Image: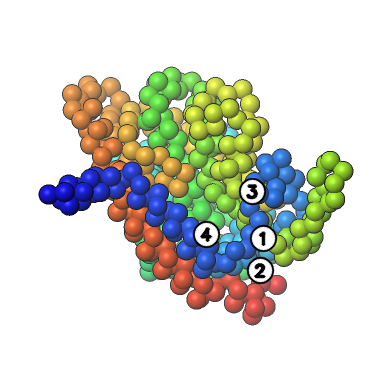
Amino acid sequence: MLVLVSLVLLLVSLPSWLPGAVVALRGRVFARVNGTEGITVPGDRFGPSRFMELYSHPAADGRSRGAALSDLFWYWLSPGAEIHQEHLEPGPRYDEVARCTRRVLRMPSRTADGLAARSVAAALPPDTGLVRLRDLVMPVWAEFYYRVVFDRPCPAEVRGMIVAAADDVATALKCCGLRHMGRRNRLTDHLERVLDEVPHELPASFSRRERALYLQGTFFVTGVVQSSEATAHVLMTLARHPDIQERAIGDDKLLAHAIEETFRMFPLFGIAHRVTSAGITLGDGEGEQDETIPAGSVLCFDYVKYQRSGYPDPDRFDPFRDQRPAYIPFGVAANRPCPAWHLAPLTVQAVVRDLLSRYTFATSAGHTRSMPNRGPCLVTPRGAAPSRLRPLALAGLRVRDRWEDVWRSLVQFVLGTFMVVHARHLRLCARHFAAGEGR
């Protein structure tokens, strides 16, 4: 009897300790497989006060070459990681790609706002009830970026291909599923077929296949995934703060502050790594001996830790904060910021504004930066009479999410370990540069 009771207690307690234990174990496995490279900032050597200095330093400009971590990111983002704007080394090819991306994304604020609203109207699934927010909004962003690139509405079949490819990348990045290259390659094949219909000037030095991969990686994977994640984070935050949610309807200033605070608490980038192309010498400001970071070092910039520094009660959602002393949701201007740094806040706000006018959102599920649960939320048409079962549904959602977290953490550990080992075996980045193709 005692053994039975002990087993029951152990099972009941699993959600409270197993996910955290598995996450810690996964971190140790990843570190062992990938090696101990990396100087984390903020970290033991350099505090938050050094973050901007190091991130903005001209020598912190390497993107992929020389970092074991790059093999893993190239694995997750394939195909086309070698020409992805995020991973290109400094040089003429990067400059050409960056100019092209800026041209495609350049548009007046009013145009961007209207395009986002039309994308919601054209592609928002009619789902209500229990919804995964990332799944709800990903078709909207697939529609949006298709219109940005092709300047026309997106056919439903193509939108499905974009969502399938983007979701596959996001799911693999979170170690919740393996890669399905067929889904990704189908989109590449389609883009290559319709490349002549793109009304923008694409990189002249790229082959036809490379241009298709550029469009896929920059707009239909990174653009769609990051915008979907950002929107889901904002809606999850508002769902957990119904008073702010209601006040934000019709109050664009408050909504903008709520979005900023969400991006501070849940940055889309966890850690960005940069490889130093030359030594970086830093003084401690107190007359002590300078410290030099040698060339070839991997700097790992921890957005989450940095954006919690300098804030009173940093884990509390507070859209009324007067200042945000550590806030770089789109990177650093001196070191390749996100090319959508101007467009993304405007369009995310436009989409959230539209969704708040249509629905109310409520959740009791967990909300973390990586959001592997894809944002479970109760979505109700605005103006509908509140259900008497709503408290029961929210209680059920809380229990369901906690138990899903137990299973999901085990899946992430197994699949994540496999993908890390597989990526290290393939060495996509290391082999690319060893063959001299990255020059």
On the image, the x and y values in percent for residue 255 come to 49, 26
Question: What's the image's color scheme?
Answer: rainbow
Element class at badge 1 = strand
On the image, the x and y values in percent for residue 417 come to 42, 65
User: Is 54 on the left-hand or right-hand side of 179?
Assistant: right
Image-quadrant location for residue 130 = top left
Q: Which callout, 1 or 3, points to the residue nearer the camera?
A: 3
Q: Residue at x 58, y 37 (%)?
A: 308
Which one is earlier in the sequence, the residue at label 2 or at label 1?
2
User: Is 122 on the left-hand or right-hand side of 282?
Assistant: left
Element class at badge 2 = loop
Please give the residue where the numbered disc 2 appears in the rendered image: 66
- Give 354 or 203, whichever is nearer the viewer: 354
Tell me, yes or no, if residue 410 can be seen here. yes
Label 3 sits on what residue type? Gly
Q: Residue at x 24, y 33 (%)?
A: 395
CA gap between label 2 and label 4 equals 22 Å
Label 4 sits on what residue type? Gly
Question: Do labels 1 and 3 touch, CB within 8 Å?
Answer: no
Q: Which callout, 4 or 3, points to the residue nearer the camera?
A: 3
Which one is earlier in the sequence, the residue at label 1 or at label 3?
3
Element class at badge 3 = loop
Please give the residue where the numbered disc 4 appears in the rendered image: 217
Q: Which mark is residue 298?
A: 1
Q: Which callout, 1 or 4, points to the residue nearer the camera?
A: 1
On the image, the x and y values in percent for residue 365 come to 33, 38
- Give 397 or 47, whichever is nearer the viewer: 47
